[in-house]
């Protein structure tokens, strides 16, 4: 398990990688740290925020895949029938796109700061894109 610090908008979270369940996805993502993007509210999936990545290829397949991440779970959709993306669930999620149901690799779980997940979701929904940074916890 690797601990990460996530700063999204004005909120900070701590997360742990899911090394046993998603070893390839976890290792690939940790290798890319620090990881900086913007996060926006999902369009089809419910109560979640996502980082759209277009046709970026992580070189990953499916592992520990789910269509229903719980609040605080972060999944990576490696691409295929829809664009590559990272999704952070803050409430009820039924992961899908305009082409239908998707499944993403659950590779990170937020362990601290979960009380701010809904506020982050509302901020993205009503105020738009927020900066997000994933980095190793010091």
Image: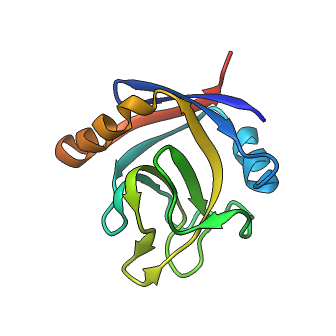
Q: Residue at x 42, y 53 (%)?
A: 50
Residue 43 location, quadrant: bottom left
Q: Give the x, y percent position of residue 52.
A: 45, 58
Q: Residue 114 or 105: which is nearer the viewer?
A: 114
Q: Residue 49 or 67: which is nearer the viewer?
A: 67
Compared across the picture, whether 64 is left or right of 7 comes to right
> In the picture, which quadrant includes the C terminus?
top right
Q: Residue at x 59, y 58 (%)?
A: 76
Compared across the picture, whether 4 is left or right of 120 comes to right
5 relative to 94, above or below: above
Q: Residue furthest top?
A: 138
Q: Give the x, y percent position of residue 75.
A: 57, 55
Q: Residue at x 38, y 37 (%)?
A: 117
119 relative to 126, above or below: above
80 relative to 14, above or below: below
Q: Give the x, y percent position of residue 130.
A: 34, 38
Q: Give the x, y percent position of residue 51.
A: 45, 52
Q: Residue at x 57, y 71 (%)?
A: 103
């Amino acid at each position: 398990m690797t601990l990460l610090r996530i700063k999204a908008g004005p909120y900070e979270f701590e997360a742990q990688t899911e090394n046993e369940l998603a070893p390839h996805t976890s290792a690939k993502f940790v290798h890319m740290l620090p990881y900086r993007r913007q996060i926006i509210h999902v369009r089809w999936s419910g109560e979640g925020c996502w980082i759209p990545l277009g046709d970026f290829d992580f070189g990953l397949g499916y592992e520990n895949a789910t269509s229903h991440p719980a609040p605080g779970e972060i999944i990576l959709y490696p691409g295929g029938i829809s664009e590559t993306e990272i999704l952070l669930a803050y409430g009820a999620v039924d992961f899908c796109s305009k082409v239908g149901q998707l499944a993403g690799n659950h590779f990170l779980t937020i362990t601290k700061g979960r009380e701010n997940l809904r506020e982050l979701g509302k901020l993205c929904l009503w105020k738009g894109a927020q900066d997000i940074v994933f980095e190793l916890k010091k």
